Amino acid sequence: MFSRTTLLHAARRIEYRIRDDLYAKLLTLDQSFFAGERTGDLISRFSNDLTNVRMLVGFGVLNIINSLVLYIAALALMIRLSPTLTLYAVLPFPAMIFVVKRMSASMFRRSKRSQEELARLTSAVEENVSAAPLIKAYCREAAAIGSFREASERYMASNMRVAQLRGFMIPVMAATGALGTLIVLLVGGGKVVSGVLTLGDFVAFNGYLAMLIWPTIMLGWILNLSQRGAASMERLNWILAAVPRVSEPAEPAAVAKLQGEIELCNLVFAYGAETVLRGISLKIARGSRLGIVGPIGAGKSTLVRMLARLHPVEDGMIRIDGIDINRIPITTLRNSIGFVPQEGFLFSRTIAENVTYGREGANNEKMTAAARMAGLHDEVSRFPDGYETLVGERGITLSGGQKQRTSIARALIKDPAILILDDPLSAVDAHTEEEILTNLAGYYGSRTVIIVSHRISALRDCDLIVAIEDGRIVEQGSHVRLLEIDGRYAQLYREQQLLREIESY
């Protein structure tokens, strides 16, 4: 009882430690890792794969110890009665070990395939639950059910292959024990008749041999458990062995706070074989406002993410305050940047918790001030629970504009030296946009502000505006200067002015 409790308790502790290590490891990995992984697959590793490892180090180890003790004790007693007869009794065991060894490799492959199919099934559930409104809007319930059924059938089929192999393995082991018993009856019976072995010793010998049959059958279950655990541990080790491409500098610069002067020197970046940024050079003075405009896929979002080192940056390509970005400690760099991504993510918490997430310990006054500047306060005040309103998973209870403004408030409360707004007003109307831009104009102060937007109205007051196309800067200058050039920026401006006039009728 003590050993059982101790081992199972230890298995739970091991599971707890591995889970903590996995989560900590995931948070060290960068954007490139998550871009290639499915959320459901990662969740499956945290749940099912960890359970398999726990079962192996808990029940698996416990039964291995019990089986070994029983085997050693029974064999010792059998050898004491008749070494020759013991040799005959265990004669079939080498053949069983050979067969089991061949089958264990197949068991590992099938177990790993089963885990992968479960990961795909989990991904399908996670994706379809998140997209439930879209599925209903397009009347695709039947298609979603059919797709899930196919994934479920593949998982069942892979599990059945594991069960078939396990079902074959256990009879092989049981047959080994039965064959050993048959040999003992033939050889031992002759020894009793010839008087070499007494009838009592022969009965005792058969009793000890019977003690080996159950551990032998149990060995099949243990083997299945070990192969599933090994396959799961391999999947977990894949995460634990992952190396982040963005890491802390080996020789960090001695800088406590950044001021906000940014210089890009022939900046290049590629997603695999696809080049996104092609030699961008730009100098952004401290306290200035930079506007970035360009078509979808031009590389605008990638550019601003690199300023926060969400993507790896080659040495010498980005300098902040004259310091190579790769020499600035990541915590110092990111604490100095307020980043509002294109698609603002909200946690399943209250509005207050989402806003103050940008600055731990911020009081209600700072939270309210940030919400006012983001144009969020008046709407939140009309909610029955105000800032204590739960927003649901990913902010599902809020509108697109409210989610964006909550993300803006989260960045503003941080009081950063560099504020990056990646198309943050795409989901609000023109009037609300104007109100928010007016509020932000009084907040900018000496901060360096970078605004990415498809709307010229959000950029016209910037000190410098750059137009990016196909990963290159094709135009740059002030709003007035770019209109004088009469290039792509001016064409986009005229198109948006015409659209506004049409909408105003």
Image (cartoon, grey):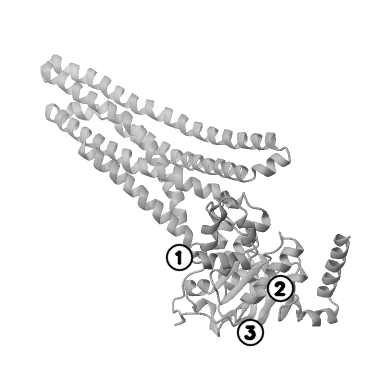
- Mark 2 surroundings: few (<14), some (14-19) or many (≥20) residues within 10 A: many
- Mark 1 surroundings: few (<14), some (14-19) or many (≥20) residues within 10 A: few
- Mark 1 belongs to which amino acid? Gly
- Mark 3 surroundings: few (<14), some (14-19) or many (≥20) residues within 10 A: some
Task: Where is residue 368? Give x, y as percent.
Answer: 56, 65
Marks 1, 2: nearer the viewer: 1
Q: Is residue 497 above or below residue 180?
A: below
Labels 2 & 3 near each other (Cβ < 8 A): no
Query: Mark 1 or mark 3: which comes first in sequence?
Result: 3
Residue 299 seen: no
Query: Mark 1 or mark 2: which comes first in sequence?
Result: 2
Residue 462 seen: yes
Element at label 1: loop
Identify the residue position indicated by label 1 in the image: 361
Identify the residue position indicated by label 2 in the image: 292
- Mark 3 belongs to which amino acid? Ala
For this view, does 108 lie left or right of residue 208? right
- Mark 2 belongs to which amino acid? Ile
Task: Where is residue 234? Give x, y as percent.
Answer: 44, 49
Identify the residue position indicated by label 3 in the image: 285
Q: Nearer the viewer, residue 30 or 487?
A: 487
Q: Nearer the viewer, residue 87 or 478?
A: 478
Q: Measure the C-alpha gap from mark 1 to mark 3.
A: 31 Å
In the rendered view of the protein, which quadrant contains the C terminus?
bottom right
Task: Where is residue 309? Give x, y as percent.
Answer: 55, 70
Residue at image point 12% right, 21% down = 201
Residue at image point 32% right, 48% down = 13
Element at label 3: loop
Element at label 2: strand
For this view, does 354 lie left or right of residue 476? left
